[in-house]
Amino acid sequence: MARLPASGSPAVPRPGPGRARLEPAQGSGQGFWALAWYRFRHHKVALAGAAVVLVLVLVTLLAGPIAPYRFEDIDLTARLRSPSWRHLLGTDTIGHDVFTRLLYAGRVSLLVGFSAAVAAASAGILIGATAGFYGGWLDNVLMRITDVSLALPDLPILIVLSKYLGGSVAGIVFVISLFAWRGVARLVRGEVLKLRGQEFADAARALGATDLRILARHLVPNTLAPVIVAATLIVGGAILTEAALSFLGIGIQPPVPSWGNMLQNAQDFILSAPRRRPQGRSGPPAQALGHRAGSRDA
Amino acid sequence: MATNGEILLEVRDLRKYYPVTKGFIFQRQVGAVKAVDDISFFIRKGETLGLVGESGCGKTTTGRVILRLQEPTAGQALFEGRDIFKLGKEELRRLRRDMQIIFQDPYSSLNPRMTVGDIIGEPLEIHRLARGKEKVRRVQELLEVVGLSPYHANRYPHEFSGGQRQRIGIARALAVNPKLIIADEPVSALDVSIQAQVLNLLEELQKEFGLTYLFIAHDLSVVKHISDRIAVMYLGKIVELAETEELFSNPQHPYTEALLSAVPIPNPELRRERIILPGDVPSPINPPSGCRFHTRCLYAQPSCKVNEPPFADIGGGHYLACPVQPFKHQRSKAAVLSKQPAKR
Amino acid sequence: MADPLLSVRNLKTYFYTDEGVVRAVDGLSYDLHRGETLGIVGESGSGKSVHALSVMRLIPTPPGKIVDGQILFEGRDLLKLSDEQMRRIRGNRIAMVFQEPMTSLNPVLTIGEQIAEAIILHQHLDKRAAWTRAAEMLERVKIPLARQRVKDYPHQFSGGMRQRVMIAMALSCNPSVLIADEPTTALDVTIQAQIIELMRELQRDFGTSIIMITHNLGVVAEMCDNVVVMYAGRPIETTTIKRIFQEPKHPYTWGLLHSVPKLYERRERLIPIEGQPPSLIDLPPGCSFAPRCPFAMEICVQADPPDFPVGPTHTAKCYLYSDKATEKEKKAAAAAGLAASSLSGS
């Protein structure tokens, strides 16, 4: 369709010199984020997803006040209990309250997820923007490194690295982001390559802006929308990866709870006593994982 | 126009080739797109030089190379006597206060993430010309100069129409008090009724701030309106350059003549003998030998295929690259027509 | 005069968007006669292109919808036809040429295949005959070595050549109406001159009626017999080509003619039309040009002006030509140079 002319309602006829005052298109100063927010509010699925994430984040952040016990509290007299009013989701092999640990584990998992996303996105932006902006051999080298690392099998390397770096949250975040930056880098490179040819980038250069300024003020901010989408995908992926590593026993180490090591802890019983306490062991962390992974698409 | 004859910018033998490469890893150069091929011209202080030609003739590349948005292949560009192409990074950055550009596309030339105030304020920041309250005041002043309102500073580009965005781009260029502005098709993306607003604004600003323009456009009527002198480009070469009145009343190059006659005139009474050029513009990768226009020229001689015509003054600052000069001593049809006032 | 070939009556095409209803075409009427070239002139957002898609019934629905009006083609209302009946008319009896010669051709089919496709579909020729006709059409539009070039792909043609191919394709079924939507806008001026010349010549040979949609007043002057000037979805002035340039009656038309730089007249200063075109979602009350009109009167912001006859075969939607305007207001407009001769006393 034809481009619609902007402008609201120019008030009075104003014959006169060429520099009549001009009214801008719409009412108020609407920024990019305001607009994004407007669109977001009108997208029901996105809203629902955001609500789930929000609840998860709130609940895990408020684990202290909500949880009935401390996560390291052990009640040796009440091991492997079914859900009850005392232990909402029952207890595990050594008498931890599962509900409490689930909340605290969520804290760890989300921390891992978000930190990994931020770390990976930052690295990806740095590498992708440099490659896209300077082009030539630098681009070639950086992108070939990216390609090669994409071609390597993730899981075996993850496992090996985790063996040495795993255990702590920081170690896990580092290991996971080592594999997550590549997608962002490719994405940012493509966007920067496209934006570099736009006239506002030329305009900035013509104004005497330094490369750093052109990148930081003009190019990177304009790549953020797709990067944010990619980063939210990384959050979900990182949580799952952390869970997988912890499940294998090379991720977050007990007594710090994570959804992964809780699952590992429960796995012995899912087959031996699935009906007896299905909810009590593997159910809650698995469901929490499912929720988190599911809502990442929002 | 206030011209005291002093030359602000002189371009000598400027060339810009783009390599055409083949191969994936070991890229071999197999040819070159000769976007700009050995052009020379100068612009006097306070005048407007129009650079006109069809798409692919190299006019936009010329503008960008002069600003060093792209690096030249060869040649010199003397701005107040200093060769722009020899400047180091820091010197170049400082020179950019003196030379600015206005772009064609009012949509892609403004960063959508920045407010209008930030966009216009950026050059002030870069060159440390103003900060804080002083910057805000200067931005508001610039907005008023281009016919917008100070309160527009807080808005984003997408809230403005094409014509208004072009004004914002002009304000940004003016922020550093430049001496030379390269206007690259500044009105071609605008609606007819808005074009006149922007053209008038550019003229007013020239008077007010003593600006010098290199006005690049494909629309002959627009170029004629705003320029003091006009250079006509064809396939990377300037084929003719003369004072505006002289060029329109006495075009000497066959291409200029055809170009003038091809413009549809909004006057049904004025039916002209039209010169319809045969064929298309050849590819700049392997441009025709000799005179590049000979493949379409109605007056071409056998020698035109071989000898590249020199670009020389044929008198009174009228430069021409055509040895045949089919219109020598003869006023063209366009000239005859221009003498009859259009009937109203 | 004979019955018009195509008669558009009070056409209204609206788009229903999140922001509101866009009145892209809002009450357009005109007649197109056999062999005539009618210019539809307007700036972006004037509704000229949406109107063309409406006539072809190619408006994307939703969000668009033809909400009112008639499009009478040879006496039949196109808006009442079934999709199947419309398919037989589209491309066959009414053909269209678009602005962008680069994107209107399918890059993976040869030129010959694309032209032949339409011929087979509408003319029921076999493949060989259709192919021959395709080559003939390319010759008609003066593509050098046409017989060999039918086997070429679109990317092997330049912009001007592609537009020739588009014209060949449009004319291949010998339509009675050709709608050309800014056919020369994307082309260089020397190529534009070639295409205009070609279209004129083909119209002489084929007798096709042409609706020429453009913003370029020069193209209109060169090609058209009659003109409809559109502003904000409405036809604000309708008349012959001579009258529109000599005696523009609507202040918008008048302003438009004065705001373009002329090639063969010296002007110190252009007289622009002030302000910006209105938003089609939120049209000003009364005449939509009133906020930018130097002659606007009180009535102009209150009521939408109907067509007023301002001469033989000449109407304008402007209250200056009604008894609502006082002698003084008419004189003021005349003093400013607006078609002085017929203002007072009309």
Image (tube, coloured by chain):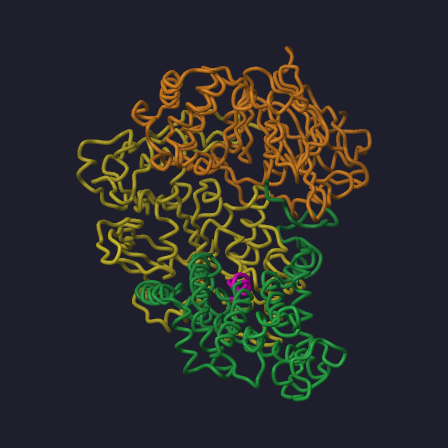
Chain colours: A green, B yellow, C orange
Single out the residue that lies furthest toward the top: C2
If the image is split into quadrants, where does the C terminus of chain B sit? Answer: top right
State left or right for residue C60 relative to residue C152: right
Residue C327 within the segment the image draws in magenta: no
Q: Residue at x 75, y 40 (%)?
A: C296
Along the line of sight, the residue nearer the viewer: B181 or C57: C57
Q: In this orientation, which residue lies closer to the viewer: A41 or C229?
A: A41
- Residue lying furthest front: A272
Question: What is the magenta range?
Answer: A221-229
Residue at (24% x, 39% y) in the render: B288
The residue at the point 25 percent across, 50 percent down is: B32
Q: How far from the left and from the top, in percent, is residue A140?
A: 32, 63
Number of marks drawn: 0
Identify the residue shown where x is 36% and y is 33%: B258
Q: Which secondary structure is most common in the magenta stretch? A: helix
Question: In the image, residue B46 lies at what x, y percent?
Answer: 45, 57
Q: Is residue B187 visible?
A: yes
In the image, residue C21 sits, relative to residue C7, either above or below, namely below
**Is residue A228 covered in magenta?**
yes
Task: Name the one closer to the observer, C82 or C92.
Answer: C82
Residue B316: x percent and y percent?
32, 45
Q: Nearer the viewer, residue A145 or A13?
A: A145
Q: Is residue B7 visible?
A: no
Q: Is residue C109 above or below residue A264?
A: above
Would residue C213 be found to the left or right of residue C100 on screen?
right
The x, y position of residue C179, in whole percent, is 54, 26
